[in-house]
Amino acid sequence: MPLNATSDISSPAGTDWRIQPQGDRCLLITFGERIDAAIGRTCLAAARKLRDAGLPGVTDVVPSFVAVAVHYRPDGLGNGPTYADLAERIEALLADGIQADAAAGREVDVPVCYGGEHGPDLDEVARAAGLTPDEVIALHSGPRSMVFMLGFAPGHAYLGVHDEKLNLPRRASPRTAVPPGAVAIANRQTVIYPNRLPGGWHIIGATPLTMFDPARDPAAYLQPGDSVRFVPITPDEFERLREARP
C-alpha cells in the first residue's frame, strides 16, 4: 500500500499516536516529533504491549526514538493480515491504555576513558561548546542517560538526552572507521560503537566493555530502556578492564 494521507489511522481524541503504512510489510506507530525521554518510554511500553499480544502475522516489533515499527507478513504471504486489519487491531490495543514504566530498564554503569587517544575530539567539542574538557566530561557523565534504541548496527546504542550545551551537529567529514567501544556525541545524544564502523559523531572517549557479542545472551550489552551512568576512568583503568574481559 503506498504511503498517503488517506491511509493514516489517527488516534482518538486525548491520545497521541498515528498509525500509517511503511511499505507493504510494515506499519509505523508515531508517538511524537521530538527526542524526549517520556516519548521514548511510551514507545518502549507500546512495543512491549504489542509483543505480548502475539498478533497473528507480526514478525518483529522495533521501538525507536518517537515511533514503533511493526513488521508483518501481509495477506497472501502465509495468510497474514492486511494493513487495515492489523492497524485496527493495534488501534484497539493502544486505546486500551499504554502504561509507560519510568524504570522499565536496568541501571547500568559504563566506564569511559575520556580524551587523549580514546577521545580525539574532546578538545574540539569543548571549544565548540565554550567549555573546558573537564566541564564536557562532567556534563556527559553527571546525569544518567536513557537508551532510546539500538540501530545502524547490532548493539549500536543511542542514548540521551544531554544538556543543551552538548547540542553539537555531527562532524562535517565523517570517519571511514571508528574503533569499537568509541563513545561519541552529537545533537544531545551519545552513541557507543559496538564494532569498527564508519561514523560522523564526535568521539570524546571509549569504553573497554564489549558492546555486542553474538555468543552472549542478550548479545547487546545495552538494551532500550536502560538507564546508563557514564563513569570516568583513567587510561590505566581502561587497559586493566580491557584485559580482564572474558
Image (cartoon, grey):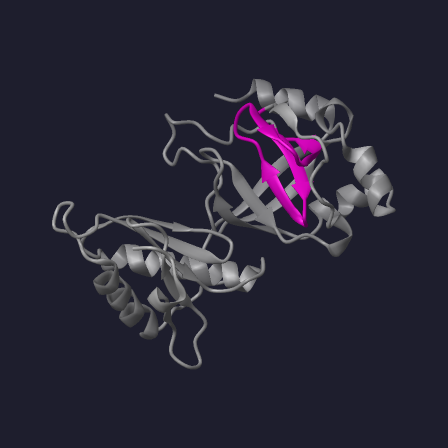
Q: Position of residue 26 (x, y in %)?
A: 32, 51
Does 14 sit above or below residue 5? Answer: below
Segment tinted magenta in the rendering: 180-207
- Residue at 22% x, 55% y is 54
- Residue at 64% x, 34% y is 183
* Residue 187 in magenta stretch: yes
Query: Between residues 234 and 174, which one lies in front from this camera angle?
Result: 174
- Residue at 62% x, 23% y is 176
Query: Between residues 82 and 58, which one lies in front from this camera angle?
Result: 82
- Count of numbered badges drawn on the protein: 0
Quadrant location of the N terminus?
bottom left
Mark yes or no: residue 222 visible.
yes
Mark yes or no: residue 181 visible.
no
Does 138 sit above or below residue 171? Answer: below
Query: Between residues 190 and 78, which one lies in front from this camera angle?
Result: 78
Q: Quadrant of residue 47?
A: bottom left
Direction from residue 32 to residue 163 in the image, left or right: right
Q: Position of residue 135 (x, y in %)?
A: 82, 45
Residue located farthest toward the left when viewing the structure as drawn: 79
Does 30 sit above or below residue 218? Answer: below
* Residue 245 in magenta stretch: no
